[in-house]
């Protein structure tokens, strides 16, 4: 009996120790660390993007209808013209009537098409605005030097497309015609003000639905046309001059 009593007492003693003990924790300590990242202006050339879905993650390869070797490369950054469509008004019968010819849509490798467009990228990291201008370098002239007198190009249904969260340029011309003599001042067509225009922007003429009717060439019926190819060129100029107000239209 003494042996049994000893066992019971011993168990009771150790059980009491387990039930009444509490863990002891060290006081919590805190320490602050930091994370930084720096950005610098990007000097790289930005590839062309889809004018209707201008995502730089998905560049495209435009086809130049006037140059089988491909379009001219874009200018280097950080404020750059990445691409500008060349225009083809097709092969047409000589007419003595006033005629309007539409530029063909911008074609891409792979068979897709989209609006003709100009692409601008601002990777300066300042969001201080910019301006885009265009000039026609003289009238259409044939391979033998004959001028297509009175011919006039009109751009219409222009819009700005981007996926950038920076505000779109506040000023643009949605319709304009160019002076074809090559002596006039350049036409200012898009302007971004301070706090606008950082990232990649597409100045597109029309939409996927109207892409083949947004740039037209008017030719008077009275103008003599030779059975030759006629050609002109454009110069697009991008400057770091910001828009001076927020009127919306140039």
Image: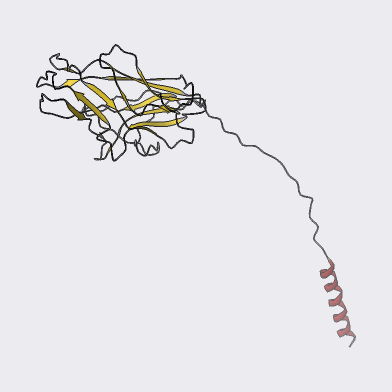
Q: Residue at x 85, y 77 (%)?
A: 12
Which x, y percent locates residue 157? 32, 32
Between 97 and 152, the one nearer to me in the picture: 97
Which x, y percent locates residue 168? 45, 32
Q: If the image is split into quadrants, where does the C terminus sit? A: top left
Between 66 and 105, the one nearer to me in the picture: 105
Q: Is residue 149 above or below residue 110?
A: above
Q: Which residue is the extreme one toward the top?
A: 183
Rendering quarter of residue 148: top left
Residue 226 as seen in the image, left or right of residue 135: left
Which x, y percent locates residue 16? 85, 72
Residue 249 as seen in the image, left or right of residue 90: right
Colour scheme shown: secondary structure
Residue 209 as seen in the image, left or right of residue 129: left
Which x, y percent locates residue 23? 80, 60
Q: Is residue 4 above or below residue 69?
A: below
Between 177 and 242, the one nearer to me in the picture: 177
Q: Which residue is the extreme one toward the right?
A: 2
Q: Is residue 202 above or below residue 18?
A: above
Q: Residue at x 31, y 35 (%)?
A: 206
Q: How many marks?
A: 0
Whether residue 47 appears in this view of the structure is no
Between 63 and 102, the one nearer to me in the picture: 102
Rendering quarter of residue 119: top left
Q: Which residue is the extreme one toward the bottom?
A: 1
Whether residue 177 appears in this view of the structure is yes
Rendering quarter of residue 212: top left
Q: If the image is split into quadrants, where does the N terminus sit? A: bottom right
Q: Is residue 4 above or below residue 80?
A: below
């Amino acid at each position: 009996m003494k042996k049994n009593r000893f066992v019971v007492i011993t168990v009771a003693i150790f059980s009491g120790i387990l039930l009444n003990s509490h863990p002891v924790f060290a006081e919590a300590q805190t320490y602050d660390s930091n994370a930084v990242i720096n950005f610098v202006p990007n000097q790289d050339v930005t590839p062309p993007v889809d004018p209707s879905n201008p995502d730089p993650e998905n560049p495209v390869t435009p086809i130049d209808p006037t140059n089988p070797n491909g379009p001219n490369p874009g200018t280097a950054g950080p404020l750059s013209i990445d691409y500008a469509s060349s225009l083809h008004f097709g092969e047409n019968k000589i007419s003595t009537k006033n005629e309007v010819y539409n530029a063909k849509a911008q074609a891409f490798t792979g068979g897709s098409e989209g609006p003709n467009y100009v692409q601008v990228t601002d990777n300066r990291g300042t969001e201080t605005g910019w301006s885009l201008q265009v000039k026609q370098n003289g009238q259409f002239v044939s391979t033998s030097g004959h001028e297509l007198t009175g011919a006039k190009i009109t751009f219409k249904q222009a819009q700005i497309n981007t996926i950038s969260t920076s505000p779109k340029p506040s000023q643009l011309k949605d319709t304009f015609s160019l002076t074809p003599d090559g002596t006039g001042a350049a036409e200012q067509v898009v302007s971004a003000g301070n706090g606008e225009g950082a990232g990649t922007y597409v100045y597109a003429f029309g939409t996927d639905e109207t892409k083949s009717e947004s740039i037209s060439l008017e030719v008077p019926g009275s103008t003599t046309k030779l059975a030759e190819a006629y050609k002109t060129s454009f110069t697009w100029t991008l400057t770091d001059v910001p828009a001076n107000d927020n009127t919306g239209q140039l």
